[in-house]
Image (cartoon, rainbow, N blue to C red):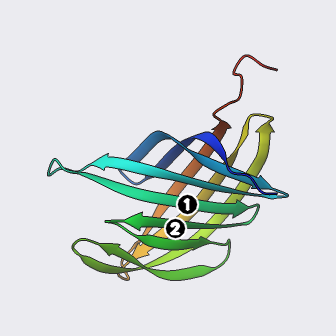
Amino acid sequence: MEEWRRAMIRVESESEGERMDISVTGEALVTEGSVRLRWTERLEEDSGFSQETRAALQARDGHAMMQRKGSYAVSMVFAPGESHETVYRTPYGELPVAVRAETVRLTMPLNAEGGEIFLAYSLQIQGGAEDQRRMRLTWRWADADPGAD
């Protein structure tokens, strides 16, 4: 039986002039050769109100899918050598987006305590220039003993 477990999830994302690094408590489900992560992000906006986004990522080596739900919503497919079109929904309108993955690497487990997903990809918003991005998601089981071997 598949069982979701509480996990500490760190999401590091960077692109030209932009960096995000958040750590949250979420859940992970590991099956043979794949992992599913889900978490909630709470980010403060310039206007002072916070937004909540529910995120989920499913990955295996060479392929990943991410879904974000909330004020800013998008579903993205990461498959090296392929371009996938989607729509990024914001409170200000919808933007057409193309996602082209270069690398999707799953390291599982790093040890008995968790694993890592690495994505290198580009986004093209409304047919503009491609923005090169990198994302690293690392998870550790929330109940793992950090002092254990």
Q: Is residue 124 left or right of residue 51?
A: right
Depth check: 67 or 83 in front? 67
Q: Measured from the top left, where is residue 68 in percent x and y? A: 46, 65
Q: Is residue 18 visible?
A: no
Q: Is residue 17 visible?
A: yes
The residue at the far front in this view is 1
Depth check: 59 or 49 in front? 49
The residue at the far left in this view is 47
- Residue visible at 22% across and 51% down in the picture: 45
Tag 1: residue type? Answer: Ala
Circle 2 packing at 10 Å, graded few (<14), some (14-19), many (20+), is: some
- Residue visible at 50% across and 73% down in the picture: 75
Depth check: 99 or 28 in front? 28
Report which residue position mark 1 lands on. Answer: 56
Q: Quadrant of residue 96?
A: bottom left
Distance in Å between CA atoms under marks 1 and 2: 5 Å
Report which residue position mark 2 lands on. Answer: 67
Tag 2: residue type? Answer: Gln
Q: Is residue 11 above or below residue 35?
A: above
Q: Measured from the top left, where is residue 83 in percent x and y? A: 58, 80
Q: Does the CB distance between marks 1 and 2 fall below 8 Å? A: yes
